[in-house]
Amino acid sequence: MAGVQWHYVLKFIITGDAAVGKSSLLVRLTDQRFLANPDPTLGVEFGSKLITIPEENKIVKLQCWDTAGTESFRSITRSYYRGAAGCLLVYDVTNRQSFLNARSWLADVREHADPHLTCILVGNKIDLCSDESSSAAAGKRKREVSTEEAELWAQEEGLLFVEASAKSGENVEAAFERATRNILDKVHRGVFDDERSPGVKLSKPSGNGIALDESQPRSGCCS
């Protein structure tokens, strides 16, 4: 793979209620650090990450759009759903309402995004759950959404599923990698056409290496 920068560029969106940790998940992925007190996302924020899929012998660039979780920005963030190949649908395992609201976010994504989009349900903030029956542990909260309930709903909706912690980094990169593998499988099966699907771009040969087709802007709305 000498001279290869990346083979595919995949567009991801991160959606869910405000304060479930979407921005912290993105910063953990891109910068390998924990964003303890992030400012509320106004509209969208962008981050990118190169990951390697060894069994595919492929380098993939993830272009991730972190969308605001407040109703006032919903009409704006919907425009970023268009053309996405992957979606992280995030809820807080210590906040049941954020899990219930995931149904509305999923309906939005399915209405505005590519019909073949790969969606992974991510239960964030597992680091906050106390393993003890009492809530005496400092800084711990009671889990309000069981792993079994969330996994069952994900299966019913045809979603991938993982629980993660932006604070510790547990399963953060794994969530993106699972979704990426699923997208690449769809590419191989012809579900995604890299020439016509805006969320999946195949890098074009340039000289002795492979370079990104720079027609897609790094900021602003992706359609």
Image (spheres, rainbow, N blue to C red):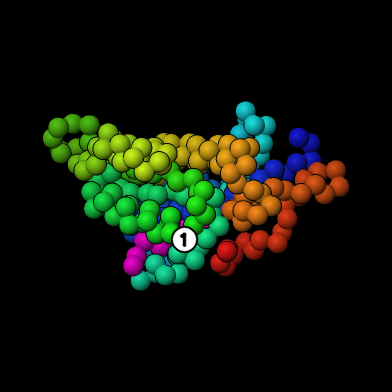
Q: Locate residue 121: give its quadrant.
A: top left
Question: Who's the residue at 52% across and 60% down the image?
Answer: 82
Query: Which residue is more in the foreground, 69 or 223?
Result: 223
Which x, y percent locates residue 42?
43, 67
The magenta stretch spans residue 66: yes
Q: Amino acid at mark 1?
A: His
On the image, numbered disc 1 is attached to which residue?
112
Q: Find the magenta span and give its range.
A: 64-71
Which x, y percent locates residue 56?
64, 32
Q: Can residue 165 be seen in the rendering of this structure?
A: no
Question: Who's the residue at 33% across and 67% down the image?
Answer: 71
**Quarter of the image containing the C terminus?**
bottom right
Which x, y percent locates residue 191?
58, 44
Image check: 138 left or right of 176? Answer: left
- The secondary structure type at the circle numbered 1 is helix
Query: Which residue is more in the foreground, 159 or 177?
Result: 159
Image check: 32 left or right of 3? Answer: left
Q: How many marks?
A: 1
Q: Locate residue 50: give its quadrant.
A: top right
Question: Who's the residue at 73% across and 55% down the image?
Answer: 213
Which x, y percent locates residue 124?
35, 44
The magenta stretch spans residue 171: no
